[in-house]
Amino acid sequence: MRWSLVRLRRLEVRRIASYEDAEIDFESLEYPVFVTGPTGAGKTTLFIDALTTALYKGAYGSEREFTDLVMKPHREGRISLEFSVGDEIYKIDRVLSSRGGKATLQKFDPKNNRWVPISSSISAIDSEIKRITSLDYNGLLNSAVIRQGEVYDFLNMKSSDRRALLLRLMNLRFEKFKEKAYEKFGDVREKISKLEGRLEERERRISEEERVRAELRDVEQKIPQLKREKDEKDKERKELSSSLGKLREKAAVLEEELKATDVEGLKKELQEKKAEYTRLNEEIRRVEEDSKRFNAKLLSDVYKYATLVHELKLWLSHLENLSREISNLEKLVMKKRKISEIKSKLEGYSGIDREVSRLKNLLEEN
């Protein structure tokens, strides 16, 4: 059960005790409210009896019927009390009558700015008031109300009786606060559970972040070595490019020599170029294997450094150009073979010429 402070807002009485009509607007007053006046002026009737009767249909400490509060000689009196519990506002109206009386309980709807009926059954209203205020009639009397005459009695009680009364009062308050504490404890426990869940998620993220940072540090440590390997590959590429340039120059010279030099003299040089081609091709194969290993290592360790991959592709493009140059050299070798075949044919033609000359000489002699 949730316990909240009951705050009075407005009290209206009609034909109650000595009051024909009376109204108190508690909202216009500042708390705490102090009421003074001579004995018998009606302070207790208005501020105690009217309140307890409105809430629990009984005057404080009275064993008489609540209808005794009705002003004589009238047979009917009215009490209307507006109060709030937390953010909720209620109003109870009671008609005190010897014919049994009536009561209505309403709750204010701020959204639609109107009063909404809760009940008009006296027994149901009594249960609802107890639920709303968390106090019944005796609980109110034992915790919040004491008549002026009973103050003297309380002070003159035996210490054991006074202690017993205080224990009852404290126990009532303690139960209310305990209920409120349990409710707060449940809220706090739920918040703690949510916070623990968020903490676990944050710890998981921190752990994941630390793992990623460790991997990043590992990659950063490998970058210098990878850069050195890249520089070495660049150096090899430059050397290969230089060798290719020299090979092109030699191929050009060879082509000129094929045009102006004895074929037999070129045969030896072609063999040398072929050996050079074989060596260069082996070197290219080795570089390509190194390049493949380099690519595999680069892709597995430095995925964020795409620029290195781009440069490697450029380098491979140069290798492809080199392969095309080598293909041209192979074509040159094929030309050399054709020249050798032509030379063989020419030598065959020389034998035929000698045979023709011999036959001519024989004819002339005959």
Image (cartoon, helix red, strand yellow):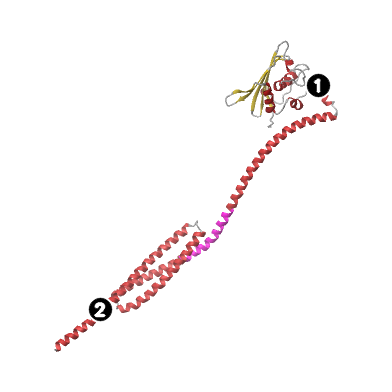
Q: Is 215 contained in the magenta span? A: yes
Residue 230 visible within the image: no
Q: Is residue 38 left or right of residue 242?
A: right
Q: Is 220 left or right of 129, judged from the image as shown?
A: left
Q: Please give the range of residues in magenta.
A: 210-233
Locate residue 212 relative to residue 12 in the image: left or right: left
User: Seen from this angle, which residue lies furthest right?
Assistant: 158
Q: Type of residue at label 1?
A: Gly
Q: Which residue lies under the disc numbered 2?
A: 346
The residue identified by callout 1 is 149
> Residue 196 occupies which quadrant of the picture?
top right
Image coords of residue 59 (percent x, y)? 74, 20
Percent from the top left, x then y, of residue 130? Answer: 70, 27
Is 186 situated left or right of 236 in this image? right
Is residue 23 located in the magenta-colored stretch of the structure? no
Q: Position of residue 202 (x, y in %)?
A: 60, 48
The amino acid on which the numbered mark 2 sits, given as a three-letter code, is Leu
Residue drawn where x is 31% and y is 74% of the image: 337
